[in-house]
Image (spheres, coloured by chain):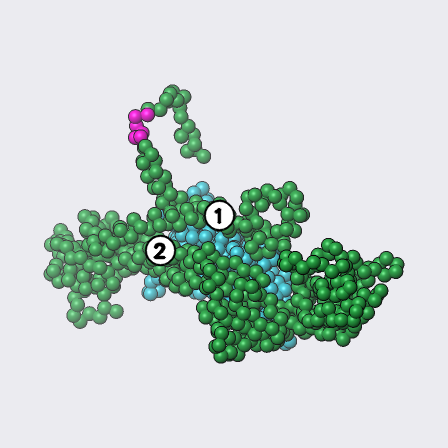
Chain colours: A green, B cyan
Amino acid sequence: MTTIKTREPAPESSKPAPQADLPRLGWRGGLRYLWTQLISMRTALILLFALALAAIPGSLVPQRRISPVRVTDFINEHPTLGPIYDKLGLFNVYASPWFSAIYLLLFVSLVGCIIPRIGVYAKALRARPPKTPRNLTRLPAYAASETADSDHDVLDRAATALRQRHYRVDIRDDSVAAERGYLREAGNLVFHISLVFVLVGVAIGALFGFRGTSVVIVGQGFSNNLTQYDDFSAGARFTDRDLAPFSVNLKDFDVKFETGPVQRGAARLFRANVEVTEGPGAPPRQEILEVNKPLHIAGTKVHLIGHGYAPKVTVKDAQGNVAFSGPVVMLPQDGNFSSIGAIKAPDARPERLAFEAFFFPTAMLDDQGPRSIFPDALNPALFVNVWYGPPKVETGRPENVYSLDTTGLSQLKEADGQPVRIGLNVGDGVNLPDGKGSIQLDGWVRWVKLQIGATPGVPISLIALGVAVMGLCLSLFVRPRRVWIRIRSDEAGRSVVEVGGLDRADARAGLTEDVAELAAELSRRPEGVSVR
Amino acid sequence: MTYEYYSSLALVSSVVVYAFAMFAHAAEWAAARRLGVAKPAARELVDVAAAQMSPEPVEGRHQPVPDPDSNAKTSPASSRRVEQLGRMGVALTVIGFLLSVAGVVMRALAADRAPWGNMFEFTITAMVFVVGVYLILVWRAGLRWLGLPVTLLAAVGNGLAVTVFYVAVAPLVPALHSVWFLIHIVAAAISGAAFNVGGVMSICYLIKKRAEERGTVRGYLIRLPDSHKIDLIAYRFLAFAFPLWTFTVVAGAIWAEYAWGRYWGWDPKETWALVTWVIYACYLHARSTAGWRGTRAAVIAIIGLASFWFNFIGINLLVSGLHSYAGI
């Protein structure tokens, strides 16, 4: 805190500062000044810290791209804070302008820092090791020993010894200058350049890649065109012609859950048997799709990322005709696969029918209401509320298949005004009151959620990361060192070998020992003396 | 069942033994208080940095011998007591280490797989690495002065594992059925151990540095190498951990591509792994920039360690994400 005092201007010097001392920058100079500031190490450090800080809110505030439902919940729970967060981009941190600004500035700073250093390094590679300092005793490590050999011999031996230790050696008049550890800076440069390539790979993936999901019921299939996707996102340079024309048939899907006392209900096995057809006319091949084992089909990856239940129901209308029959995909709501969905029979006559449906694979009915107590289908049951209404004009407008829009529908009620609730086990059929029709639970099948996608930049990023790690190791573990050896005559006329050493990187050890070892080795005659 | 039982027994015993080792080292430090203020010349007892790299045995390398010149008032008896307590601490640490290795091995036998499936198993494995590295350093480089913080860390780590994080043996969820399970988690455990040792050293550095600046280097602080050397050793650990942590994050990304269909999804765990990485990148840059060496770098290293711990404990317990599996 004492420094602040000295910086405070004394009262008598508070008159206008002499302007002439400062050169005028002009806009060009100003830009140059900004540029040197940007590529300085201090700015890089600040940007790195800023990146770390900026990444934090995204891990604590729910993110739209990861869990949109939780974002909606958050906004509903925090009516004041929610919109502010939204304006600040806190629900989409990693695509927000401020986050992008930080990492783009960081990479600009990195490039600006690295390019000049490549030039400096190229020069250093061609340069001779630096001149021998006049006074070797001033170096951090110094050792001297007498020798009986001629100066020339000793210097030759010194050069050989240093070359054996992987030094670059330069013999000067009365001395040898040597340097090693050039790879440290090379590793440093390679690491930083690789980081740029990692970003390039990510950018290519974002521009040309696509990713989408599709729910496929066991026994049914998926063919790779846009209409089959439930959701789909793609980069700016992607066109739907890039979709490979393959198809995947889901033949069956094995699921096992933990039934023991520990972690009861945890998933133990997901295995889908699929039949893959690479394109029209290609022979189908059998494959197994598991978590951690995606399918690779024509440059596209197919992952298994979710599963659930689809109860098979048959709905008959008031006239006794089948108005709907088949499996209905239900969305799981919890770890025990309590699922909700909608069964729609718009073709029922004279009135259309619709059901809000709840499916429980292992149903339990008590005073807490119906729920599932185990994720596997041990006691499947379907609960429905019934809605009916006049037939609707076909508008072609898409509607959500998982939820029921009750506009134009009335709920079917008992005589006492309570809504009709129907519980069905597999095989049960129930006639609706007032002769509105009937509903039957025929059985159930599983469905899987497939993720289909391609990220073309990944190999570039991956290779760049491998190179980066290697460069990082070089830049951290290579030890640049300079050693100088000189022959000098002392007062008695004897030859003295002087060895001086200097470490050029932090946290290096063994300099003193190496220098002492060199001095001792050079004082000996080469013949008849074992070096080790 | 029996393996699981004996594993828990060994781990609980290791906590008790580590606690006793910690008491021994604390008593060692307390006894050393009477050794008084050191003369500046007596501060460097062991040239650790030189001794570690040199192939020849260096005098005093295995044990930091008390310097007879350090203070005229120091009686040989009290020096001997400090030495005895220190040896006792190391001996107890070795016993605790063997127990904790036995606990991890039996856990693996009980589960019939690598014991890295949950927080409990990760912690006990990481603690084996921490204490193992410490014991090698004691043996090779005379770093016994790390005894108190390391046994404290080991006792607390294994203690939390057997009380708070404990889960019974169970198979893995399908997402963990991958060869990356071995690679990613071992790399995380080793780099985590090195981050912890480096962080502990950075704390020692700050304490020693402060004492040096105030001229109050007395008691046990005499036995620590001078602050510059502590800084160098801390740097070595962190410089070793950083590329390995980079590899851990990359391996995690590769695994995520297989298991979840995307290599990076800003899952809280991934985000904090990156934050930790960036903080240690700051540390390395800070050291290569003049003026940021020493205290500021040490503070960054400690922030990095805090971030590592938050990623490990805070994210697992407070935030829901894809890495929350298997109970805890």
Q: Residue at x 53, y 72 (%)?
A: A247
> In the rendered view, would you say A376 is above or below A486?
below
Residue A193 marker: 2
Coordinates of residue B36 in the picture (x, y in percent): 47, 48
Neighbours of disc 2 within 10 Å: few (<14), some (14-19), many (20+): many
Query: Where, by quadrant of the figure, is residue B250 drawn?
Result: bottom left
Q: Which residues are magenta?
A: A19-24
Frontmost residue, A361 versus B176 = A361
Which image quarter is the N terminus of chain B in?
A: bottom right
- Amino acid type of the residue tagged 2 in the rendering: Ile
- The answer to whether residue B110 of the structure is visible from this angle is no
Q: Residue at x 74, y 71 (%)?
A: A322
Q: Residue at x 17, y 71 (%)?
A: A528
Decide whether residue B320 is among the magenta residues.
Answer: no
Frontmost residue, A407 versus B135 = A407
Question: Label 1: chain?
Answer: A
Q: Which residue is mark 1?
A: A99
Q: Residue at x 76, y 57 (%)?
A: A409
Along the horizontal axis of the image, is B65 left or right of A314? left
Along the horizontal axis of the image, is B300 left or right of A134? right
Coordinates of residue A200 in the picture (x, y in percent): 40, 56
Q: CA distance from mark 2 to mark 1?
A: 21 Å
- The answer to whether residue A486 of the structure is visible from this angle is yes
- Amino acid type of the residue tagged 1 in the rendering: Phe
